[in-house]
Amino acid sequence: MKTCPTRGLNSALMIDLKALRENPQHFKDGAAKKRVSVDIDAALKLDEERRALQTQRQTLAAEQGQIEKTVGPQLGKLSGELKKAAPEAKGAIEAQIAELRAKPAAIKAKVQALEEQEKAVEPKLHALLLAIPLPPDADVPVGKGSEDNVEVRKWGPAGWDYDKGFEAIRGFKPKSHIELCRDLGLVDFPRGVKMSGTRSYVLTGMGMLLHQAILRYAVDFMVHKNGFKAMSVPVLVREECMIGTGFFPAGREQAYHINESVRQNADAEGGHDEAHTAHDLYLTGTGEVGLMGLHQDEILDESQLPLKYVTVSTCFRREAGAAGKDTAGLYRVHVFDKVEQVIICKADEAESRQWHKTMLGFVESLLQSLELPYRLLQCCTGDLGVKNADMIDVECWMPGRGESGEFGETHSASRLYDYQCRRLNMRYKSADPAVKHTVFCHSLNNTVAASPRLMIPILEMHQQKDGTVKVPAVLRPYMGGVEVIG
């Protein structure tokens, strides 16, 4: 592995500029299908302007170099003549020297002027390029939003029937997870709200143990059964990590921001306060950010791929724009814990597609082991977000949701090709000696288990007529052998 020099703003690390120049309509169609407003023509115009300025500057710089090579000897010759010249001839020689010295200085001034013009163009160009979404794959259904997503398949444990529903199968009306948490003392919502405001909670007693059991089981499931490498990752990251993973600029309003622009540090010896410029920091909404940021600005060897990482991290989301939606209970909260899987693989579409299916298979196996009915939804173009070429949502059946039970999203599996790796400048050296250049990796991510949201279908699907909750067998070893809550 090699570490590349820390990069500045580089448009080649945002979108495939060659592809954009050659087929701008592909990107225009992709943005339209994703319902993302971005002026691609303006980006191309600025790109053309910047390239023209670069060409002029490079041409002048080359000319400047040539002149400097020839001016030196001429100046040396004239300086020698000046020393020997008669007084009446010195003025003419000095004028020649001044003229020769002025030539490279004039060109240097022009080069500097062109550099300033480039600097003025770059921020506008970068802002537009950062906003261009990854075009969706051709086989993704076109749609406006989540209402146009397409069901792929459903699964249910033995004895479950979606047509009959919970009450007809189990013989009693199910409680919601909010009622179960209250009756069994699993969550203290009032005290959570008292300390942190809306969408806050305190897991208590068996509720906390169940939450931890889910996370620990999910990590072990991915590490010991599926060969992933467990990693810890920062949940407080710099802005470039959020931009690199594609969560900024589009999702900026969802992130908690910690302003660190200027802070006071005390001098260790003198005790004097000194202001230091620091990086602003952001709380991450998923472990994907940290897992992908691990290899930012690195060149990997192809033999290292695929990298299969799993992490468990606390996640923070402002839920901006979700006012009045799922405000009660554990479904939509500001802080939660999540086990996340990430795969970084070779730049091959077929391999990326296969990993997408494989990652979903891991999740399906986990949910089946928890005996939770679920379905897979193919997200339409309008529900993909800016960074995904394709995304499959997994929704678990929640008997206490709505009037007679509803599906609720618990997982999302995304295929991103080189979108993130390009922005993060994450490449690999091909094992093929004929391939001289480095190649941007592909990346994929998928939720393994997010809790306390996954507690909702577990509590509601495994509740008993007497008000207790049966603990799924696979979680019992993580709860000290407890079989029933209540």
Image (cartoon, rainbow, N blue to C red):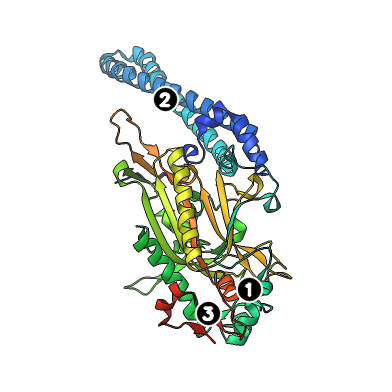
Task: Specify the amino acid type for callout 3.
Answer: Lys
According to the picture, the residue beneath numbered tag 1 turns out to be 199
Figure quadrant of residue 186: bottom right
Q: Are marks 2 and 1 in contact (CB under 8 Å)?
A: no
Mark 3, other Cα within 10 Å: few <14 / some 14–19 / many ≥20: some
Q: Earlier in the sequence, mark 2 or mark 1?
A: 2
Which numbered disc covers residue 61? Answer: 2
Residue 202: give x, y in percent of width and height: 55, 81
Foreground residue, 138 or 164?
164
Secondary structure under tag 1 reads loop
Q: Nearer the viewer, mark 1 or mark 3?
A: 3
Q: Earlier in the sequence, mark 1 or mark 3?
A: 1
Q: Is residue 394 visible?
A: yes
Q: Which residue is mark 3?
A: 470
Q: Residues within 10 Å of mark 1 (few under 14, many from 20)?
A: many
The residue shown at (52%, 81%) is: 207
Q: Position of residue 405 (x, y in %)?
A: 68, 68
Q: Amino acid at mark 2?
A: Ala
Q: Is residue 125 above or below residue 443?
A: above
Question: Looking at the picture, does residue 96 appear above or below residue 33?
Answer: above
Q: Nearer the viewer, mark 3 or mark 2?
A: 3
C-alpha separation, residue under disc 2 versus residue under disc 1: 60 Å
